[in-house]
Amino acid sequence: MEENRVQPFQKYLSGNHLYHVENLLEVHFAETKGFHSSCKVSIQETENEDGTKNWQIEKTEDVPLPSENHFMEILHELEEKSYPISIKVDEKGSFLSAADHKKYVEEWKQKTASIQEKYQNAEIFRNFYLSALEDESTYYQNQFKEPFWNLLLFAPSYADNGGDSEESIRWNIKGIGNIDCRGNLTAEQREYGFDAFFRSESTAPEHIKEELNRKYLQRAEQYQAELTIQMEYNSPKKQYTKKKAEFILRNGDQIVYREISSMI
C-alpha cells in the first residue's frame, strides 16, 4: 500500500478541556539538582470565520514542591505569570499567531512587578524575560520551548498504512539550547482511537556539547540524547487525551540530564 501521511484534527469546543500537567527536571553533574512542578491547564476554543480557531489557555498551579534550584524557581514563576494566554491555531491545532500581544505584555508587567520582594536578584531575570516578551516573534519561540507547550503543539502526521513515519521535534535543554530530535513515529489502533509512540536517539551537536562542558565544568567527548513520547488520541472527541515525554542526556553510561513531562 502506498503511504500517505494523515494529521488528526484537534477540537476543544465543548466547554473547557482540562489537562493535569507535571514536569520533573533532574541535573546530575558535580551535584544533583532537581525541580518539580505540577499544574492544571484548561483550553477553551472559539472558531473564527476563516476556519482558524482561538485557544485561550489558563494555567492553575498545584501546591509547589520544594525546589533545590533557586534559578529555576524564578524562571518558573515568571513563566507562570504569563497566563492566561490566547493563541490562534489551524484546524489541526498547529500554531499560527498570538492574540493582542501588546495588551498581554502590559498585563504581565503588572503581575510580575513585585517579584524582587520574593527573590534576590529576581529583577535581573525579569528584565531579561521582558526583553524577549516585548519581541512577539522571539517570545513565542521561547515560550514554546517549555515542555508543556512543546507537547501541546506536537501534532504529527501518521502513515496511514500502519507503518513507521519519520518525525521531528525540537527539545530545549534548560539554560543550554535547543536540540532537534529526529526519529520514528508509530501508531497502534485502539477502540477509542489510537496510541502513538515516538522515539529519537542522536549525538548532541557540538555547540550543545561545548555549552554543557562550559557550564558544568565537564570534559565529555560527546553526549547522547534520547527522547521518547507516548500519546493517546480519542477519535470521537478529536482530542489527544494523554501525552508524555522523557528526554535524557547521557555521558557514556551516566545520565546527566533528565526531563519528564506529561499532560493527562
Image (cartoon, grey):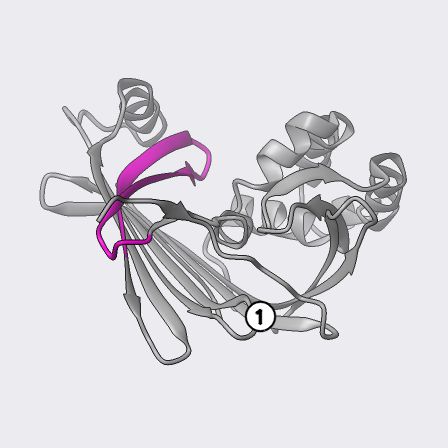
> Residue at (49%, 59%) from the top-left corner?
67
Using a 10 Å C-alpha cutoff, classify the residue at mark 1 as few (fewer than 14 neighbours), some (14 to 19) or many (20 or more).
some
198, 161: nearer the viewer: 161
Q: Position of residue 219 (x, y in %)?
A: 18, 24
> Residue at (67%, 43%) from the top-left corner?
120
Q: Position of residue 234 (x, y in %)?
A: 47, 72
- Magenta residues span 160-186
Side of 237 relative to 123 (left or right): left
Q: Name the outermost residue toward the left.
A: 253
> Residue at (33%, 23%) from the top-left corner?
214
Q: Amino acid at mark 1?
A: Tyr
Judging by the rendered image, the residue that carries numbered circle 1 is 19
Q: Name the outermost residue toward the front.
A: 1
99, 222: nearer the viewer: 99
Observer able to see residue 128: no
54, 116: nearer the viewer: 54
Could you tell me what secondary structure mostly forms the magenta stretch?
strand
240, 59: nearer the viewer: 240
Q: Position of residue 243 (x, y in %)?
A: 43, 63
Q: Position of residue 231 (x, y in %)?
A: 38, 63
Observer able to see residue 147: yes
Examine the rendered structure and indicate whether residue 239 appears above or below residue 251.
below
> Residue at (9%, 45%) from the top-left corner?
253
Secondary structure at badge 1 equals strand
Q: Is residue 137 magenta?
A: no
> What is the count of numbered marks?
1
Examine the rendered structure and indicate whether residue 58 appears above or below residue 69.
below
Kindly indicate the quadrant of the structure image that contains residue 88: top right
Q: Is residue 179 magenta?
A: yes
Side of 131 relative to 26 (left or right): right
Examine the rendered structure and indicate whether residue 202 appears above or below residue 197.
above
